[in-house]
Amino acid sequence: MAVPVPPDLEGDLDVVLKGMSNHRQVRWVSRAQLHITLRFIGDFEESFLARLESVLGKVASSTLPFEAEIGGLNAFPRMEQARVLFIPVTRGDEDFRRLEKALTVNSAALGIRPDVKEYHPHLTLGRVRENENPKAAQRALQEVLPPQWPPWRADRFILFKSQLAAGGSVYTRLVEFKLGV
């Protein structure tokens, strides 16, 4: 499940990422992968989808849209040992956390286990390749990334199907849920 970014922001981020293509020590995400993940569910049978949709729909209808903004650059587990480069959420952080918590609590009734890691809302830019040093890519990103991107109204989340492929994950939209509806 993920909150999409608006098309104009998606386009601007795509331009930045295409400009980073010469930094091959990082596997950059594609435009189709630009979103703010709420949580992963894992594999499930297609027959489970209707029950899941019902639960997610209830969470969406009881959650109001909110203002969101991203800015800066950070990394997991930390900048000095970067494995994943990302832009953190700088506005709406608590709203994302509340939504993720509601999704986690409500989907637990369906047997979906909570994530063991603490939730940090962010937009992934790329994953550092095995045994590579991303320092040059980090410096290049810091030069081109603005301190803040334009804010947007987070008014929906999407249940995606994720399939691993040679170029990274391929996301297929299954169901979109509008907040507060």
Image (cartoon, rainbow, N blue to C red):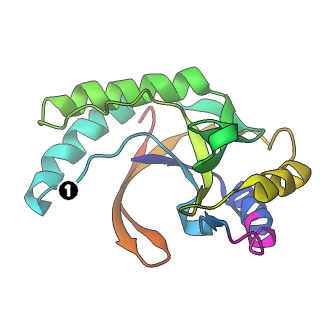
Q: Is residue 23 magenta?
A: yes
Residue at (8% x, 58% y) in the render: 47
Measured from the top left, where is residue 13 in percent x and y? 74, 59
Q: Which residue is mark 1?
A: 43
Relative to 150, residue 109 above or below = above
Relative to 108, residue 47 above or below = below
Which residue is at the front of the view, 130 or 102?
A: 130
Q: Is residue 52 magenta?
A: no
Which residue is at the front of the view, 69 or 168?
A: 168
Q: Quadrant of the C terminus?
A: top left
Asked whether residue 64 appears in the rendered view, the answer is: no
Q: Is residue 24 left or right of residue 114?
A: right
Name the outermost residue toward the left. Answer: 47
Measured from the top left, where is residue 82 in percent x and y? 63, 46
Relative to 108, residue 33 above or below = below
Residue at (78% x, 39% y) in the render: 72
Secondary structure mainly formed by the magenta segment: loop
Q: Residues within 10 Å of mark 1 (few under 14, many from 20)?
A: few
Q: Is residue 6 left or right of residue 44?
A: right
Measured from the top left, where is residue 50 in percent x and y? 15, 51
Residue at (22% x, 34% y) in the render: 107
Residue at (79% x, 63% y) in the render: 16
Magenta residues span 17-24
Q: Is residue 169 left or right of residue 124?
A: left
Which residue is at the front of the view, 153 or 143?
A: 143
Tag 1 secondary structure: loop
Q: Amino acid at mark 1?
A: Asp
